[in-house]
Amino acid sequence: MTHQDSDLPESGSAAPADPDTTHFGYRTVRAAEKAGMVRGVFDSVASRYDLMNDLMSGGVHRLWKDSFVHQVSPRPGMACLDVGGGTGDIAFRLLDHMTRRAEAKRRQTEDETTDEALAQAPPAGGGRVTVCDINENMIRVGRDRALDRGLVTGLDWLVGDAEKLPVDDASVDVYTIAFCLRNVTHIDNALAEARRVLKPGGRFYCLEFSKVVLPGLDRLYDVYSFSVLPTLGQVVARDRESYEYLAESIRRFPPQEELCRRMTAAGLRHARYRNLSAGIAAIHSGWRL
């Protein structure tokens, strides 16, 4: 894993020359159409989304998400917003992390407090995580998973666009977005929205596929992405096209240094990144000051 600051050379994929168009994988489409097209992709794969993640990554995506939440390390009582997290994978981890920290603090208090004072103390609480996703089917999957886990408190679910969040200004302590930012129509608008909803001193965290930095691995990864991945999509999810889009969207996403620069331009300070698995994925972080 590597750490880098944001003052690095600029690089990245070119945006369409026409401001009314954008990329959908390798296709150029009207900007107004992309959100609906992405919604269609995830409508198609929602019921098998987590299974496909396991198959595509050999389970490594779970390690990436664990590392991501460990880096976020939210404190009990924090208000967290997880954007594009419909199935709940990140939200459940965030909530569990806060709950375990609250319980550990309470156990420490029990060792240091009299029985009388302890009896009057409020119960230990975790925090609150709001999941916001543009796709209602993904939200439905997440809610069902939460009920299966017995999670009935501490979670809120919103249907909304990352570029127009239905969230108040300066209202969240932590903003997370995992494997979603590459799907938005205008990345810069989504970054600006992240800054808007964060409280001063709040943190931004993004986990996303990125640019492989290990020579040789990039070629193997291309073969896997454009040959194996669509075939898995066809066999398991009966949807080759959606997984072809997935591979193309990863290649279109800005590399690590460029995303840091765009975070800074959106008003997120101290932009940094950490590579995972030689850059197959990366965690970016920044502050709203």
Image (cartoon, grey):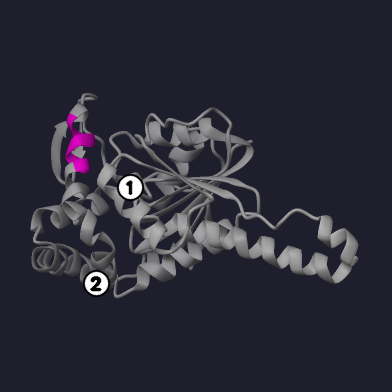
Query: Residue 63: x and y, percent?
Result: 43, 71
Residue 48 is a magenta residue: no
Quarter of the image where one finds residue 226: bottom left
> What is the x, y in percent for residue 127?
60, 51
Residue sitting at the far bottom? 58
Q: What kind of secondary structure does the magenta stretch mostly adopt?
A: helix
**Side of 122 relative to 265 (left or right):** right
Q: Where are the magenta residues, as a range?
A: 33-39
| Residue visible at 17% across and 39% down in the picture | 37
Residue type at the position of mark 1: Ile
Q: Callout 2: 10 Å neighbours few (<14), some, many (20+)?
A: some
Q: Nearer the viewer, mark 2 or mark 1?
A: 1
Tag 1's secondary structure?
A: helix
Q: Residue 222 got which mark?
A: none
Residue pointed to by mark 2: 55
Query: At numbered mark 2, what does the secondary structure look like: helix, strand or loop?
Result: helix
User: Residue 199: x, y in percent?
Assistant: 61, 35
- Mark earlier in primary sequence (2, 1): 2
- Residue name at image x 29 percent, y 70 percent: 54
Residue that numbered label 1 is attached to: 139
Number of numbered discs overlaid on the protein picture: 2
Give the vertical position of 55 relative to 86 (above or below): below
Identify residue type, mark 2.
Answer: Leu
Identity of the residue drawn at 20% across and 25% down? 18
Q: Is residue 62 visible?
A: yes
Q: Quadrant of the C terminus?
A: top right
